[in-house]
Amino acid sequence: MRPASHPPAMSPANDLERGRAAYASRAWRDAFDALANADRAQPLDDADLELLGWSAGLSGHDEDMFGAFERLHRLRSEQGDHVPAARAAFWLGFRLLFLGEMGRGTGWIAQAHRSLERCSADCVERGYLRIPETRALIVRDRNPAAGLEVAETIVQIADRFHDEDLASIARMLQGQAHLALGAQQRGLASMDEAMLVATTGRLSPMVTGLVYCAVISACHNVYALDRAREWTAVLSAWCESQPQLAAFNGKCRVHRSEILQLQGDWEEAITEAHHAVAPQAPSDVVAAAQYQEAEIRRLRGEFAEAEAAYHQASRHGRDPQPGLALLRLAQGNHGAAAAQIRAALDAARDPLVRTRYLPAAVEIQLATGDRAAATDAARELAQIAETTHNEIVEAMAAHATGAVRLAAGDAEHAIEPLRRSFALWQHAAAPYLAARIRVLIGDALRERGDDEGAALEREAAREVFRSLHAAPDLARLEQRGAARNDRPFGLTPRELEVLRLVASGRTNRAISQELFLSEKTVDRHVSNIFTKLDVSTRAAATAFAFQHKLN
């Protein structure tokens, strides 16, 4: 009888081969496990130790990555390979900086510089070591012009050494500098160039993920939502092609959640946010995911869950505004809402950062009766839209302008900006925001006496709110309907106000001055009053008002 066959026992050599093969197929967790086993049996050499470090980082084992690259730096330094040692120290430091560990990160960047001081060779690593300097100039020092100059030098070094990883990072930094300088189109063009190379597969996995995340975050920051949607889809496909990838999967899911929320897939957006909060997820990813969940919970009226998520976002370092202020408004705590949004605006200086808070400020200030502050906020938003030439900012500004005019009783001049905002949000495939605009358009049409047009706008908005389970918006729609039914003789509050002034003997010009309306708007209100009361003269309208105690 032939002896039974058994699979060969695992050996360090088998682990090493399995690890190399898994790395080549981008099975990062398998590569890390096999290479770590081989390393425990016998310390890896230079090339395989580098594979261990990268597979650890890409599979979410950052401390193991740091340990591998520390050893790699020491090994190369002992061998007198100072340029490769500098590269190992750079990536160790850069990864630490990326994760927010400034002390350790800065220390390892300094070690990389010290390694290069031991040799005089012109090398591409000198370009890599200027990356932290460039980021600091753009972000920390708020000197994007100087940062742009250094980024252009890095591009030249990358091109001279034909290093596509360095070139893509440098072009991404160029884009960030241009955006900080207000040159949005040039900035996005530089980032598109970096992204195009990333999509070809020619970059290393770590650099590919870094470029994807940086570019998509920048697109969100400047409201380039079409690009954000496009590049997020590419990033999602890249992550899905590597099921064992952990390093960028959390950020990818947060970006997807933001896009899904915008386009009305709220349930899936919450699911993506939940998946982003993995056990080893960095704090910034957890904070962004919690804020995402909080926003959708608030819009669905799940206020307790929203509050808990906002607090979690804040605990992990994310500013919970403007969402928390809008939650307080929805809860009826107008004082807290006004104080919080005012504090957020007071702390913001950059126009694009202020753009994040201004729409909420307009909504809160109108709800609390501070029409002057709302007018100022809407005007500032319009000025930012003029300088950025960005359709999304224009949509926000037009919405704010229309809402302020409507609150002032100028429905006639509110309709145009509201319709413009609706068209822009509809083009951006943002059904919830478009539906909110339709509610205001309906209010404006009703003020002008077009009850049928108003009903059509309200019904279209109601259908969207129902599909999204947006309970607070549905409740506000019902309150509007109840208020409409309670109006005497179908007169709007503004029409009642005008009627009382007509009954007091004031002319249309006097009424326009008292109510801060155009005389043309007052003429239209008077015409609507005559139609609804079925009278043809001011004297008859005055008599009607006295008879029915409307004065």
Image (cartoon, grey):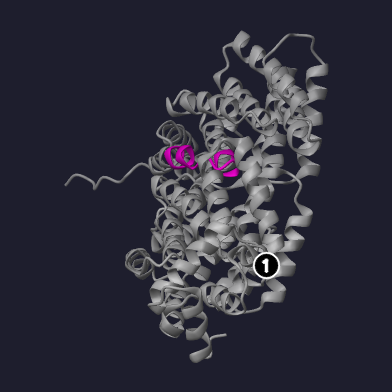
Q: Residue at x 70, y 30 (%)?
A: 181
Residue 141 appearing in the image:
yes
* Image height of 266 relative to 237, above or below: below
In which quadrant of the rendered view does residue 141 lie? top right
Q: Residue at x 48, y 23 (%)?
A: 197
* Image height of 260 relative to 463, above or below: above
Which stretch did the figure color magenta? 218-231
Q: Residue at x 49, y 42 (%)?
A: 225
In the foreground, 518 or 305: 518
Count neighbours of disc 1 (C-alpha within 10 A) and say few if under 14, some if 14 to 19, many if 20 or more.
few
Q: Position of residue 44 (x, y in %)?
A: 59, 32
Count of picture labels: 1
Q: Position of residue 365 (x, y in %)?
A: 66, 66
Q: Secondary structure at mark 1?
A: helix
Give the residue number, with chain letter if any, for mark 1: 514
- What is the three-letter code of the residue carrying label 1? Glu
Furthest residue in direction left, as rendered: 1
Q: Residue at x 46, y 80 (%)?
A: 540
In the foreground, 389 or 346: 389
In which quadrant of the rendered view does residue 283 lie? bottom right
Residue 42 appearing in the image:
no
Residue 183 appears left or right of 523: right
In the foreground, 447 or 6: 447
